[in-house]
Image: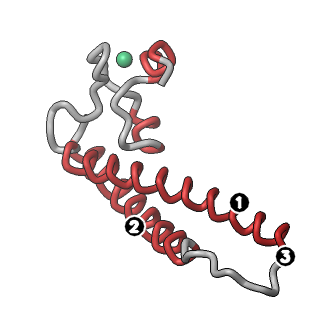
Amino acid sequence: MTKEQKQELKSIIQIQILTLTDEITTIQKLLQPIKKDCALDNVAHQSLKQDQNINIQRYEVSKIRLGKLKAAYLRVDTNEYGVCKECEEDINIARLKLIPESQYCISCMNELGL
Ligand SMILES: [Zn+2]
């Protein structure tokens, strides 16, 4: 991987971190506890709870991804970045641009069922 490619990946990761941080803040605002509202019937309350569960899931997934992206950012300048952990081949640069935190190439990922 060239220096320019690493630089480009770093900016991609930075943008993704910012976007994800924004998203997490937005979800956090939605995650206020549901108040018992007398105006709401049971059905409405149930559906609020369902929305809440979806948001909690999104929140968890985003938090995990954010952690991975931050770790990837620190790894970009090391030799292990962009190298598949399984077969030690270079990971396709197009794949890294889409998913910079990738630690496996596509064929190993499929083989490992990740
Ligand atoms: Zn591989």
56 on left or right of 25: right
What type is the residue that disc 2 sits on? Leu
- Disc assigned to residue 86: none
Residue at x 33% of width, y 46% of height: 68
Residue 93's place in the image compared with 51, above or below, is: above
Residue count near mark 2 (Cα–Cα under 10 Å), binned few <14, some 14–19, many ≥20: few
Dot 2: element: helix
Residue at x 54% of width, y 69% of height: 27
Dot 1: element: helix
Which badge, 3 or 2, is on the more N-terminal residue?
A: 2
Q: CA distance from mark 2 to mark 1?
A: 28 Å
- State the residue position of label 2: 18
* Quadrant in which residue 21 is drawn: bottom left
- State the residue position of label 3: 41
Residue count near mark 1 (Cα–Cα under 10 Å), binned few <14, some 14–19, many ≥20: few
Residue 63's place in the image compared with 33, above or below, is: above
What type is the residue that disc 3 sits on? Asp
- State the residue position of label 1: 50
What type is the residue that disc 1 sits on? Gln
Residue at x 41% of width, y 29% of height: 92
Residue count near mark 3 (Cα–Cα under 10 Å), binned few <14, some 14–19, many ≥20: few
Dot 3: element: loop
81 on left or right of 20: left
In this view, which residue lies farthest toward the left?
Answer: 78
Residue 46's place in the image compared with 5, above or below, is: below
Q: Nearer the viewer, mark 3 or mark 2?
A: 3
Q: Position of residue 41 (x, y in %)?
A: 84, 76
Q: How many labels were placed on the picture?
A: 3
Q: Position of residue 64 (x, y in %)?
A: 40, 49
